[in-house]
Image (cartoon, helix red, strand yellow):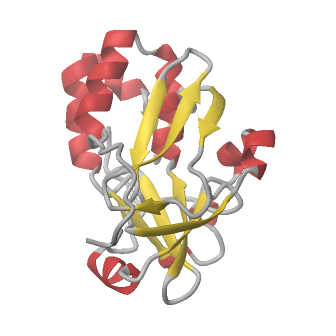
């Protein structure tokens, strides 16, 4: 699978340089000094497969970095939990995507945002993470894991600079679980009721 630069930057919105990507396959776009939209990446969507629903957090929930933020639930019954890249308070949940899950496929880095978080540590977070295309951030690690689990079949999952849509549906359960454990960080499930930024 070749290492390439993105050939279609418009899919990241009008200003892709404002996006920051987390190793848990989520992205952050600041909309103020302490507020940001947070969403999932094309890779996570492709790995999850065809979606049945998304288990979103409740508004006003306090979260810490590394706690479960939402779960992508596939029609196969697989559940892909993703961790919060930020500590803070969930201000708004984009419940509109539940009525139009295809919006995530059409615009995962735009109107497909999932939550808006207020985070006092947002400026430091943005300084520490570069504005890179998510498939390039950790692409070597992802490629190595897929080759270990899938062998030569891994070559068909990435075409040019894009991931094959819903490729997770083509994976056996043991393959999917193995890749999930290698590529998605484990999360803490307890809600934080104290300072969420520590």
> Quadrant location of residue 149?
top left
The correct choice, above or below, for 170 with respect to 192 in the image is above
**Could one spot residue 132 in this view of the protein?**
yes
Which residue ends up furthest to the bottom in the rendered image? 33
Q: Could you say which is closer to the camera, residue 10 or residue 178?
A: 178
The quadrant of the image that shows the N terminus is top left
Q: Could you say which is closer to the camera, residue 45 or residue 120?
A: 120
Q: Position of residue 156 (x, y in %)?
A: 42, 25
> Quadrant location of residue 110?
bottom right
Which residue ends up furthest to the front in the rendered image? 193
**Could one spot residue 100 in this view of the protein?**
no
The quadrant of the image that shows the C terminus is bottom left
Q: Residue at x 59, y 46 (%)?
A: 56
Q: Position of residue 171 (x, y in %)?
A: 42, 15
Q: Count up the numbered dots.
A: 0
Q: Position of residue 163 (x, y in %)?
A: 48, 39
The correct choice, above or below, for 81 with respect to 74 in the image is below
Q: Could you say which is closer to the camera, residue 118 or residue 176?
A: 118
Q: Residue at x 29, y 48 (%)?
A: 139
> Quadrant location of residue 13?
bottom right
Q: Position of residue 58 (x, y in %)?
A: 60, 52
Q: Residue at x 49, y 84 (%)?
A: 34
């Amino acid at each position: 699978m070749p290492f390439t630069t993105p050939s279609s930057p418009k899919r990241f919105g009008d200003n892709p340089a404002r996006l920051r990507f987390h190793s848990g396959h989520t992205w952050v776009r600041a909309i103020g000094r302490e507020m940001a939209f947070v969403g999932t990446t094309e890779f996570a969507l492709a790995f999850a497969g065809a979606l049945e629903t998304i288990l979103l957090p409740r508004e006003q929930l306090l979260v810490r970095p590394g706690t479960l933020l939402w779960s992508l639930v596939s029609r196969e019954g697989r559940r892909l939990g993703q961790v919060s890249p930020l500590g803070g308070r969930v201000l708004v949940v984009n419940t509109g995507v539940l009525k139009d899950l295809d919006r995530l496929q059409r615009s995962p880095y735009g109107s497909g945002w999932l939550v808006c978080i207020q985070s006092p540590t947002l400026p430091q977070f943005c300084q520490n993470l570069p504005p890179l295309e998510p498939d390039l951030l950790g692409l070597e690690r992802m490629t190595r894991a897929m080759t270990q689990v899938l062998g030569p079949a891994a070559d068909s999952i990435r075409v040019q600079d894009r991931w094959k849509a819903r490729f997770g549906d083509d994976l056996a359960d043991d393959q999917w679980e193995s890749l999930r454990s290698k590529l998605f960080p484990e999360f803490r499930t307890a809600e934080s009721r104290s300072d969420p930024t520590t």
